[in-house]
Image (tube, rainbow, N blue to C red):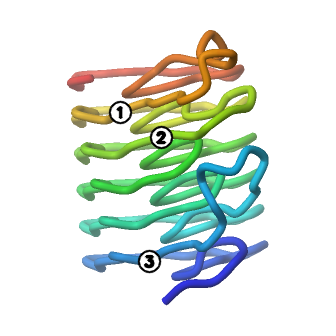
């Protein structure tokens, strides 16, 4: 399934979403991740002013727009427990993108995700996790084998973080592998 907009698989606003033992795979947001300032959101799950909980779930093989290949959350609380977010592709936050949110990852794996874009500030940051003005806590989890690619050298100095990219807010890592 493909569409333009905020998460072709699941999109919630001012709501609660709980996924337990669920697979969200192979969804493709048609917004072009290689087009600067092309503002589609995650390929799998997008939340705005919402509470999202993933337990024992898999978010895999999704392609997002400019924010989050797998999952994106704005002004939200996102909890990922005992889950896998892998092999997703997006412009900023290949696996997970959060803005003005609280992100808690516990006992989970974020791996094999790619953040890439042609140009633009913050383009291609956070292959695994990208955060803007958010509180991020990662406990007993693995964030590995994620890739950040900035294809325009003019913007290559803006960002870093193949695994995790934090701009404002906080990051707490506990008993985790990055």
- In the displayed structure, 97 sits above or below 52; it is above
Whether residue 140 is visible to the viewer of this picture, yes or no, is no
Q: Earlier in the sequence, mark 3 or mark 2?
A: 3
- In the displayed structure, 49 sits above or below 145; it is below
Whether residue 27 is visible to the viewer of this picture, yes or no, is yes
- Which residue matches tag 3? 27
- Which residue matches tag 1? 147
- Which residue matches tag 2? 115
Find the distance from the CA under tag 1 to the CA under tag 2. 6 Å
Residue at 75%, 55% (x, y): give it. 38
Instruction: Tell me whether the residue at label 1 lies in contact with that at label 3, contact meaning CB atoms closer than 8 angstroms.
Output: no
Find the distance from the CA under tag 3 to the CA under tag 2. 16 Å
Instruction: Tell me whether the residue at label 1 lies in contact with that at label 2, contact meaning CB atoms closer than 8 angstroms.
Output: yes
Number of residues whose C-alpha sits closer than 10 Å to that of mark 2, classed few (under 14), some (14–19) or many (20 or more): many
Residue at 22%, 34% (x, y): give it. 145
x%, y% of residue 25? 33, 76
- In the displayed structure, 170 sits above or below 145; it is above
- At mark 1, the secondary structure is strand
Find the distance from the CA under tag 1 to the CA under tag 3. 20 Å
Number of residues whose C-alpha sits closer than 10 Å to that of mark 1, classed few (under 14), some (14–19) or many (20 or more): many
Q: Nearer the viewer, residue 108 or 131?
A: 131
Give the quadrant of residue 65: bottom right
Residue at 28%, 69% (x, y): give it. 57
x%, y% of residue 4? 69, 78
- At mark 3, the secondary structure is loop
x%, y% of residue 109? 24, 46
């Amino acid at each position: 399934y493909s569409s333009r907009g905020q998460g072709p698989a699941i999109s919630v606003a001012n709501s609660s979403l709980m996924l337990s033992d669920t697979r969200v795979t192979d969804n493709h947001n048609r917004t072009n991740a290689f087009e600067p300032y092309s503002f589609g959101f995650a390929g799998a799950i997008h939340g705005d002013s919402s509470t999202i909980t993933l337990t024992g779930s898999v978010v895999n093989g999704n392609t997002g727009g400019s924010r989050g290949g797998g999952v994106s959350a704005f002004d939200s609380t996102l909890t990922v427990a005992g889950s896998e977010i892998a092999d997703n592709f997006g412009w900023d936050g290949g696996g997970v993108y959060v803005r003005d949110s609280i992100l808690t990852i516990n006992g989970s794996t974020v791996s094999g995700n790619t953040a890439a874009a042609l140009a633009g500030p913050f383009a291609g940051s956070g292959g695994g996790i990208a955060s803007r003005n958010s509180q991020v806590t990662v406990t007993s989890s693995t964030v590995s084998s994620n890739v950040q690619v900035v294809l325009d050298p003019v913007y290559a100095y803006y960002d870093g973080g193949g695994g995790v990219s934090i701009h404002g807010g906080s990051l707490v890592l506990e008993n985790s592998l990055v």
